[in-house]
Image: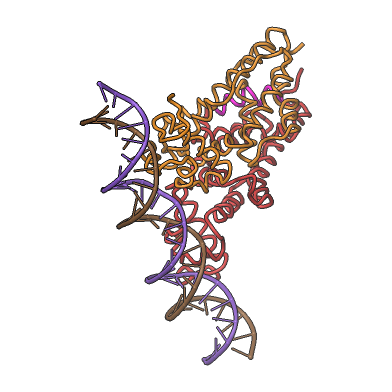
Chain colours: A orange, B red, C purple, D brown
DNA sequence: TTCAATAGTGAACGATTCGTTCACTAAATG
DNA sequence: CATTTAGTGAACGAATCGTTCACTATTGAA
């Protein structure tokens, strides 16, 4: 067994435990109140183990953001009913923001600066955005195939529009978009923009 | 003179000086590294004067956000050329994000939580969004008047779309949208959405 | 003009949290 | 079984927090 239940964990095993602890802690107290000591305690690890891996809170949260992003289930098969498909995925994203995923995003954004490590920032951003872009592109492609979506809707900025609006809403309001807000985004913005003109 | 150049300042006079100091400090070191002591020192004020007004950093920055929002020049007369008008205003917003305005936004967002004081959060949000909404509504109205914009484009979510995209870009990328990004937002999203169908 | 009330200053303080260090111990390696 | 590698837990100095207090400047009323 590499994953022993008792005893002292090491390597990736321990690292995962720390990430999970960080995410739980984050959901409870928020990034602004996140204490390294609390994360260590929750993970039943030594503080030194944290500082050995990341030089400070900001680095820990970046790593946690990437961990969280890759841990999210991203599988989705479009039905061809574009509005329904988008609504479903958008609700899933909003749900995810309502927990550690949201807090880790907020914390990451708070530490971002024009002077931050650009390369690392880009990786975090990609980890968050790419899976979403892929899903929405798939949905749009299905819509193009059945003639309900205009082909030019595959422009990156349009593909990214729905998730971007959700992020924007979450960051500015402090909580995820409700179902009715999602419906409005779809009916007033996204659908009119992608619909095939007849 | 209420605004004496030398001597000890009080009341609103002092408060403004503290806000200015906080904004400068914010632009230099970012919210994450903002020290109350540093703000006090820069304002040539006692730390006690800060804590007398706001219980902590989070409250100070909220107040600073509202101060900054009201201090921004918001006057704009639409020419009727909708795309040009929007581009001009969007560039102005991006420019503003490239300084204290951007840092104060980032810091505020970082402290927002579902458990925060909803009322105060709403006030900050309004102070930031309302002036923008008014300007874009004016631009759209001018466009509707000359027939280049469809009347339904006055929907709040559409009016708010351009500034929202700028905010989203700034928060996720860490820096304001460039001129070419602004052009893309207009050409791929906003203009197709508001254009009167012929 | 004087004087009391109000508001700000600056320094000091205990309490936290930070990030580091170190002696000790468990797990992996061979 | 011996050696190497990695983690633990406690202790530490430094930085920052938010508070307190004795002192001083400004204001406005007597």
Q: Nearer the viewer, residue B110 or A9?
A: A9
Quadrant showing the C terminus of chain A: top right
Could you tell me what secondary structure mostly forms the magenta stretch?
A: helix
Magenta stretch encompasses residue B146: no
Is B190 contained in the magenta span?
yes
Per the rendered image, the range of residues in magenta is B181-194
Residue B123 x, y percent position in the rendering: 67, 50
Quarter location, residue C9 = bottom left
A182, B96: nearer the viewer: A182
Q: Is residue B19 left or right of residue A77?
A: left
Numbered label tally: 0
- In the image, taking residue D22 as reference, residue A138 lies left or right, namely right
Image vertical order of residue D23 relative to residue B50, above or below: below
Q: Is residue A145 above or below residue B35?
A: above
**Residue A196 horizontal side relative to residue A152, left or right:** right
Locate the N terminus of chain A by quadrant: top left
Q: Is residue B25 above or below residue A23?
A: below
Image coordinates of residue A36 in percent, x first then y, are: 45, 45
| Residue A63 percent coordinates (x, y) | 45, 33
> Dividing the picture into quarters, in which one does residue A140 lie?
top right
Residue B44 percent location from the top left of the image: 43, 64
């Amino acid at each position: 067994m590499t994953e022993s239940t008792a005893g002292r964990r090491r390597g990736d095993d321990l690292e995962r435990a720390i990430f999970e602890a960080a995410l739980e802690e984050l959901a409870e107290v928020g990034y602004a109140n996140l204490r390294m000591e609390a994360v260590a305690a929750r993970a039943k690890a030594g503080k030194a183990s944290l500082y050995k891996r990341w030089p400070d809170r900001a680095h820990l949260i970046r790593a946690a953001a990437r961990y969280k992003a890759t841990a999210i289930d991203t599988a989705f098969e479009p039905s061809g009913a574009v509005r329904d498909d988008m609504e479903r995925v958008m609700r899933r994203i909003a749900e995810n923001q309502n927990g550690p995923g949201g807090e880790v995003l907020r914390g990451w954004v708070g530490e971002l600066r024009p002077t931050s490590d650009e390369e690392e920032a880009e990786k975090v951003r990609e980890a968050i955005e790419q899976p979403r872009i892929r899903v929405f592109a798939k949905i749009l492609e299905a819509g193009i195939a059945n003639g309900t979506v205009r082909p030019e809707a595959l422009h990156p900025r349009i593909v990214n529009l729905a998730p971007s609006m959700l992020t924007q809403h979450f960051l500015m309001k402090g909580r995820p978009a409700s179902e009715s807000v999602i419906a409005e985004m779809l009916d007033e913005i996204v659908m009119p923009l992608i619909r095939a003109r007849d």
